[in-house]
Image: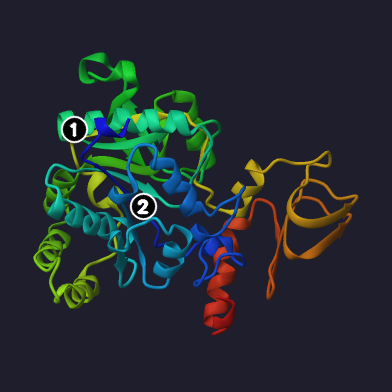
Amino acid sequence: MRSDFPNVYAVIMAGGSGTRFWPRSRERMPKQVLEIIGSGSMISNTIARIESLVPIERILVVTNKNQKDLIQKQVPSIIANNILVEPVGRNTAACIGLAAKWINYYDPDAIMVTLPADHIIKDVNEFINVIKKAVRVAKENDALVTIGITPTYPGTGYGYIQFDDSKDLNPYIDEEVFKVKTFAEKPNLETAEKFLKSGDFLWNSGMFIWKANVIIKEIEKHLPELGEQLAKLEKMIGTDKYESTLEYVYGVIRSISIDYGVMEKASNVYVAKGNFGWSDVGSWDEVANITPTNEDKNAFRGLVITKDSHRNYIDAGNKVVATIGVDDLIIIATDDAVLVCKKGRSQEVKDIVDQLRRKQLNEFL
């Protein structure tokens, strides 16, 4: 299988802080290195999925200095030089540009499969099939390809991608790969319902496939300041000036997403439709929604005892958590903090983290 894709590389974006998953997720132990659902950390599961297509020596991880050692410990097979460290987070355009420069330096014919470290995918075989289709389109057309997820409900927590299903514009329509019409920001409920009803909108998964040299050119075209700084950095790859140049470059570039900076402006953009049991696990509510429940509709991890309690999600950590007469709560217990949150409001956990930071309670961050 792998021999059919000799120039395919995987880039795992793993620099996020996961503030919506406090108190489990901390600066020293962020979401992607935790077991949130099932067994294995999110990043180790992500790498295991793509390893069926891309060998470990062609898998790169982009992260920050606080997480490098954690990732090496969890995925010891990853080559140390394949972990690219950003001095500070500058969003996905910089992350992807950095990885593209490294890959293109060693393999000018490379195709990048760019994946977030913290997604859940249930049907791995179908996921790999969709990636293969996307690789083919990227290779044959010098295209930017993203993965769009068939929506199952009017979600307001995702961006959307509208595709063109006319046959004359879509040579890959039989493989469910379409030209992109437009990208839409996270909608309100009314708009999300319209998107779902229309049938030509997909959830934006944040997964991308393209040739390394093509995305470099698109960054240079649409984000010339970033392109200029990355060009300076590329000249220093493999030299003793790389680290100091990296620090300088990340000190002057601005933070911008690849979606807003490039994808929404580029013309040769395709979307491959995916239906493989995907979740971006963006909040504790998402975890609650995809975790199996008992007869009282409670879902939990660890030692939990309930009485007259329904539809709760409880992560007991190393403690015993008991509830009496409570419904529709999210309860997360750790050694030094407990979160109690009404279901439907877990996106606001990041506000609690902001309060802790303002109060300089850094030991809890």
Q: Residue 139 carries which label?
A: 1
Q: In this view, does 28 lie above or below 185?
A: below
- Quick check: marks 1 and 2 in contact, CB under 8 Å? no
Task: State the SS at label 2.
Answer: strand
Between 82 and 271, the residue placed more toward the observer is 82
Quadrant of the rendering where the C terminus is positioned: bottom right
Q: In this view, does 360 lie above or below 29?
A: below
Q: In this view, does 224 lie above or below 113?
A: below
Between 186 and 50, the residue placed more toward the observer is 50
Q: Residue 10 carries which label?
A: none
At horizontal 82% and vertical 47% (from top left) the residue drawn is: 310
Task: State the SS at label 1.
Answer: helix
At horizontal 42% and vertical 48% (from top left) the residue drawn is: 47
Image x and y of residue 110, in percent? 18, 43
Q: Earlier in the sequence, mark 1 or mark 2?
A: 2
Amino acid type of the residue tagged 1 in the rendering: Lys
